[in-house]
Amino acid sequence: GESVGLHLPTLSVQEGDNSIINCAYSNSASDYFIWYKQESGKGPQFIIDIRSNMDKRQGQRVTVLLNKTVKHLSLQIAATQPGDSAVYFCAENSGSARQLTFGSGTQLTVLP
Amino acid sequence: KAGVTQTPRYLIKTRGQQVTLSCSPISGHRSVSWYQQTPGQGLQFLFEYFSETQRNKGNFPGRFSGRQFSNSRSEMNVSTLELGDSALYLCASSLVGPATRSGANVLTFGAGSRLTVL
C-alpha cells in the first residue's frame, strides 16, 4: 500500500540557520502534497502545499521542493527561529484532497 | 474567525465504555474529517463527512463511528473502548468546491481530544 516516510525522526539546527526536512512517498499516483507543523498540545497547522504539476513552491520563509522522479519532497525553512520548533509532517492525498496519508513526522529543535 | 473547536479536550475512560467526541468546524466549512494520532501509528484517517453523509472511511473497526449534523457540526463515537484506543483524536474541517487558490481546500485542524483508556 501507499506510505509516506521521513528520512530523520529528529533534526536540530542553530537559530538563524536554514532547515531542511525530507520526506519520501511511495504512491506514484499522488498528486497533492502538504506540509503541516504541530506544536506541543496543538493540532497540525498548515504550512504549505504543492501539486504534482509543480516542482517548487515558496511561501513566507518556507520552500517546498518536489521531485517526482525519485518520489521525494522537502521542506526548507529559512533563518530558522525558536518558534519553528515543532514536529513537521508531510502528507499526500489518497484519492481525495481532504483524505491525507501522513508521514511519521520530524521533530525540529532550534538551538539558541 | 473562530477555528475548529473540539470538546472535550481531555477525558479518561475505562475499557468497555463508550465515548462521544464533538467537533465544530470553521464557519462555512462543510467537510469534517477525523484523524487518530498515536505515538506508534502516527496520524491515521478515520472518516470524512460532508452534507451529513460519510464520504470516506479509513481502516478502523466498526466500533468507530461518526455523524454530521445539518449545521456541519460532527461527532464521533467509539464503543467498547480498548486500551489501544488511547490517542489524540483530531477533527479537521475544509471548504468543499473548486479551489480558487492554493490552500483553499486544505484541512484546518482543531486542538484535538485527548482520550485515555484505563
Image (cartoon, helix red, strand yellow):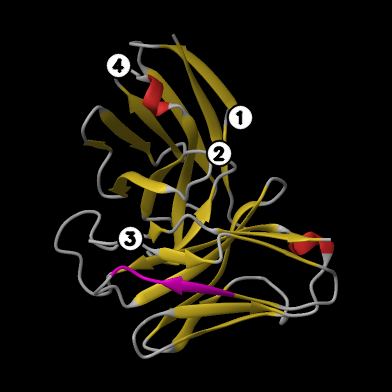
The spot of residue A94 in percent (x, y) is 47, 63
Q: Quadrant of the N terminus of chain B?
A: bottom left
Q: Viewed as shown, does residue B63 lie left or right of B9?
A: right
Q: Which residue is mark 4?
A: A79
**Chain ID of residue with mark 1:** A
Numbered tag placed on residue B3 in the rendering: 3
Crowd band around label 3 with a 10 angstrom C-alpha radius: few (<14), some (14–19), many (20+) = some
Q: Which residue corresponds to mark 2?
A: A105
CA separation, marks 1 and 3?
29 Å
Residue pictured at 21% horizontal, 32% vertical: A60
Q: Are marks 1 and 4 in contact (CB under 8 Å)?
A: no
Labels 1 and 2 touching (C-beta < 8 A): yes
- The amino acid pointed to by label 3 is Gly
Frontmost of labels 4 and 3 is 3
Q: Chain of mark 2?
A: A
**Which residue range is magenta in the image?**
B21-26
